Image: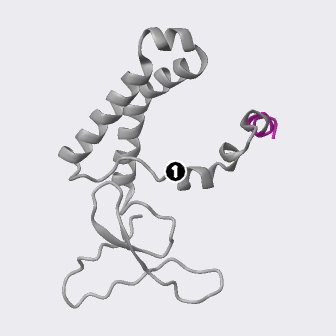
Amino acid sequence: MSAPRLDAPAGVTITCTEPRLDGAAPSLLDRTCLWCGQAYLSPAPETEFCGSPCRKAFNNLRAMRGAELYDLFMALRHDRAVATAFKVWRALNRLAAGFRFEDRVERAGRRSWRHPGVILARRPYLGSDAPHVDLRRKAEG
């Protein structure tokens, strides 16, 4: 269920129906959707989208763009000679520049990526000095 938008009709009060564990009335936070850029209200500070359609569109765009980035980055990281011969670093930068251009034209300049702090908070093992050890533990657990 999507959070209500700020542009409610005149005279309509927007309230949140999500219960809180402590029984208190939830407070609503002004948020901006990462996909459509519209303002909306949400009781949860971690929400990023005004609803499921925007969340799905954002993630579909990232998935569509990510496949080529993944292949090129893995070659850059693990097959350096081939990556150098094919100028993979240049290709990665051109892809990123093209994605940013699309964001400016098609998304009114809104970025199509999450803040690195959000990603690192979700996956703390990425900030480790020895991420391969943490990845093995994650796979075992």
Which residue is denoted by mark 1 in the rendering?
116
Q: Quadrant of the C terminus?
A: top right
* x then y, percent, for residue 53: 34, 52
| Left or right placement of residue 23 versus residue 30 in this view | right
Q: Quadrant of the N terminus?
A: bottom left
Residue under the image location 43 percent in, 19 percent down: 88
Figure coloring: one colour
Secondary-structure class at tag 1: helix
How many neighbours does mark 1 have within 10 angstroms: few (below 14), some (14-19), or many (20 or more)? Answer: few
Q: Along the line of sight, which residue is nearer the eye, 123 or 78?
A: 78
Establish if 70 lies above or below 50.
above
Establish if 72 lies above or below 23.
above
Residue under the image location 76 percent in, 35 percent down: 139
Amino acid type at image mark 1: Pro
| Left or right placement of residue 61 versus residue 47 in this view | left
Establish if 89 lies above or below 138.
above
Residue under the image location 65 percent in, 85 percent down: 22
* x then y, percent, for residue 30: 38, 76
Q: Which residues are magenta?
A: 134-141
Q: Along the line of sight, which residue is nearer the eye, 14 or 81?
A: 81
* x then y, percent, for residue 34: 36, 57
